[in-house]
Image: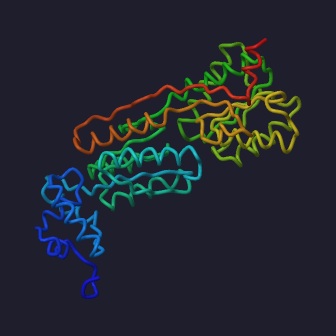
Amino acid sequence: MLANRPPNSYDVAQAAGVSQSAVSRAFSPGRSIAKATKEKVLKAAAELGYQPNAIARSMSSARTKAVQKSGLVGVVVTQLENQFFAKIVHTLSLSLQEQGWQILLFSVESEVDVDPALFELTQYQVDGVIVLSALMSQKVAQHCRNLSTPVVVFNRYIKDLDISAVRVDNYAGGRMAADVIVDAKHQYIAHIAGIQEEQTGVDRELGFCERLRERGATLYQREVGDYTFDSGYEATQRLLNMQPRPDAIFCASDLMALGAMHAARTLFGLSIPTDLTIIGFDDVPAAAWPGHQLTTISQPIEEMGQAAVKTLVSEMENPETPASQQVFAGKMVLRSSSLSDLYAQI
């Protein structure tokens, strides 16, 4: 501290015997500065306890540009406690930092909170927004356009909104799950669907049911969850209380599938997969744990995250960039929660 105040860049420049612009260059990645000068600046800064103000530096550099930039990208996410979304946020954060942006994270309780969060985000003058949710209104989309704030929807897409989206092929993933179940000769096939208002779960269910019909099978029973462990646990209780009870369940998310697995084992004493096949979707880290070994459809999260960031950066740097829809292929990951491997050996 200097005279009861924190040190500033002027103090560092005086101590190092350099200009303030040299101090700025020393703390700006990629800026040209002599190695010896940078070392003097960093040494003086360490001795004084100086920390640069990243926001002030960003705003200062923005004044020289036609369009002011904050250096911030807003990320809105529901169910951050879900391993899948946490992994996405981690991937997006790393990718954005590599491009020179930092994230401003808004975690909301439910889908209905997305619109208010987006309105609040724009007050921070973020340069762009990535939304990990399926529900966003036309009103909010227009609000973002009026502010020239690009928006990319991740792992979702929103019909009738001209907004860029990056997602997995959910319809094809549902078809993969149906093939594994039909190949294992199951007769009482159930599905735990996702939130009815969002297209992701709708597409997974549509692909699953259409492929069952194509293979000469039928859906025995259907329940609905909200992509949480508890909803999968509760839906499975209802399914397994039926007579005859299902011998296979396809869940619209891994968390619901893990809930289904625990309900089947702890409440009904069933063996998986001998008594019941369970398939999920997403391939969260817990799916591969020894106690789970969940068969699931994996999403190429790193590729999708990089694509989302590349799309957003392009739209932030060039507002005339048209919206795009990018769809990635999922991959069936066979583990021991399904009978597919056993039947393959017969």
Visual colour scheme: rainbow
**Residue at far bottom of view:** 3
Residue at 55 percent across and 52 percent down: it is 80
Q: Is residue 177 left or right of residue 108?
A: right
Q: Position of residue 256 (x, y in %)?
A: 68, 41
Q: Quadrant of residue 281?
A: top right
Q: Is residue 140 left or right of residue 344?
A: left
Q: In the rendered image, which quarter contains the C terminus?
A: top right
- The answer to whether 121 is drawn above or below residue 237 in the figure is below
As rendered, which of 37 and 169 lies closer to the eye?
37
Q: Quadrant of residue 303?
A: top left
As rendered, which of 202 and 39 lies closer to the eye?
39
Q: In the rendered image, which quarter contains the N terminus?
A: bottom left
Number of numbered discs on residues: 0
Q: Position of residue 238 (x, y in %)?
A: 81, 41
Residue at 75 percent across and 42 percent down: it is 235
- The answer to whether 169 is drawn above or below residue 29 in the figure is above
Residue at 63 percent across and 20 percent down: it is 210
Q: Position of residue 203 (x, y in %)?
A: 56, 30
Q: Position of residue 144 (x, y in %)?
A: 32, 50
- The answer to whether 24 is drawn above or below residue 336 in the figure is below
As rendered, which of 74 and 206 lies closer to the eye?
74
